[in-house]
Image (cartoon, rainbow, N blue to C red):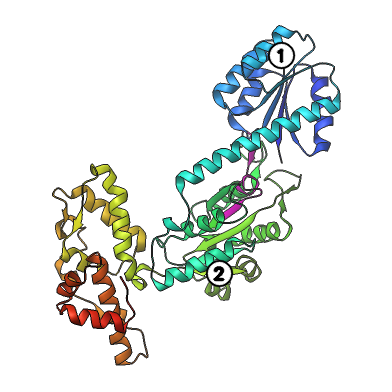
Amino acid sequence: MDTILVVDDEKNYLVVLEAILEPEGYEVITADNASAALKHIRESDIDLVVTDIKMPGISGMKLLEKCKKIRPELPVIMMTAYGTIEMAVEAMKKDAFDYITKPFKNEELKIIIKKALENYRLAKENRRLSEALLDRYKYYNIIGKSKPMLKIYNLIRKVALSRASTLITGPSGTGKELIAKAIHYNGPRKEFPFISINCGGLAEALLESELFGHEKGAFTGAIAMKKGKFELADKGTFFLDEVGDMPLLLQVKLLRVLQEMEFERVGGTRSIKVDVRIISASNRNIKEDVANGLFREDLYYRLNVMDIEVPPLSERIDDIPLLVRYFIKKYGENQDQKKIELHPEVWKALYNHSWPGNVRELENVIERAVVLDSDGIITLDDLPQGFTKAETEFDIERFIPPNVSLPGILEKIEEKLIRRALFQCNNVQSHAAKRLGITKSLIKHKMKKYNITV
């Protein structure tokens, strides 16, 4: 719902404009002086200002100037009963969207307002698109080519084209929000907002206000109307991160919004309709929470029309070399583009670490190592305290799945070791063979056996 601020010292005009615009579906806020108007512009989510020019104290022209300093993109329509060509030219020079004289024709005003709001929406969408291009939230920002990641890419392609609610689960630090953004930016809503909220990081009352917005005076500290995240996400995607931590009372309200796609702001009575695609994420076992009465079953099935499970880094260690090189490139840019390599002992430590913090932990480790590195070779001394020499001992127990045959597991390990060595040696077979402690002819034989091409 677009919000229009009408400013005029003649209160009868405020009443008239409110009566004209509210039936058109606009939310109208009124102010009878420029000082009150500036407070609304600073504190409320305004989409358009319609202001009289001649007012006591701060004039409409001054209000226009101050408004453009606070929010340069906000459109302002000027009104006056004393219209002159010079005044119109001055208003347009100061970046007013348009100029209309009193008494005006209702239909003419409606057309100007509609055009101003369309231009404002277009400008915001263009800005979002530019930011999206800079963020580059496409598949190439999700790093990995292991079998679990290839499965996720396939799911993203399918899910992105639908509007089905999607639940992404997995441990913290695995990149659930990146996957949510990949779904959004590869789908039909990519030109509209991607709005996110962390449901576990806010108190219940504050979370409700953030989700649905609030009216002025709804509670202590609500000094102005504020639109909620649902409203800001209209026509786009709303990402509910850590949805499993949402209080039960709010789960009921969220379910109603998902069913009806409408809600009221806190302290409000007017229903606001939205068109939003919901993606949620959690590091909890929500199905278990449902069984324990901690999460509503009906909400769970509403959120989980499609599901994507993101594996921990320990289950896709094949992706470690790709991730390491990506992070070295990312953080090496601040180190004069110097070439940085890893000592073999460091690779060993990275492969054998349990990665409780997943990809986020790996990124922190590499960023730290790049900062500490002075000679282009990252050594064990550049790693955090947890990466001790003792930790480089191979903990094979945690990598062996249950009920597997000896030949089967040995072949899987052999194939992974060969692929990893080739990757680390830039596909130079003689170097990879040396790293593995085998002959070049044997590595060729094994590559043929496992259908490995370089």
Amino acid type of the residue that numbered disc 2 sits on in the rendered structure: Asp
Q: Quadrant of residue 89?
A: top right
Earlier-in-chain disc, 1 versus 2: 1
Determine if the magenta segment contains residue 157: no
Q: Which residues are magenta?
A: 223-239
Q: Is residue 160 above or below residue 450?
A: above
Q: Picture coordinates of residue 412 (x, y %)?
A: 32, 82
Q: Would you say 163 lies left or right of 448 here?
A: right
Q: Is residue 19 left or right of residue 126?
A: right
Image quadrant in which the N terminus is located: top right
Please, what secondary structure does the residue beneath circle 1 have? loop
The residue lying at 27 percent from left, 51 percent from top is 367
The secondary element bearing badge 2 is classed as: strand
The reply to whether the C-beta atoms of the residues labelled 1 and 2 are less than 8 Å apart is: no
| Residue 430 appears in the rendering | yes
Q: What amino acid does circle 1 point to?
A: Ile
User: What residue is shown with label 2?
Assistant: 307
| Residue 104 percent coordinates (x, y) | 84, 20
| Residue 132 position (above or below residue 62) | below
Q: How many marks?
A: 2
Q: Is residue 294 above or below residue 82?
A: below
Residue depicted at x 75% and y 29%: 113
- Say if 224 sits above or below 434 in the image: above
Q: Which mark is residue 53?
A: 1
Identify the image quadrant of residue 6.
Answer: top right
Disc 1 from disc 2: Cα separation: 55 Å
Give the numbered dot on residue 112: none
In the image, 320: left or right of 309? left
Please state if 150 lies on the left or on the right of 427 as rendered: right
Q: Considering depth in this image, is 290 or 442 the residue closer to the camera?
A: 442
Q: Is residue 55 visible?
A: no
232 inside magenta stretch: yes
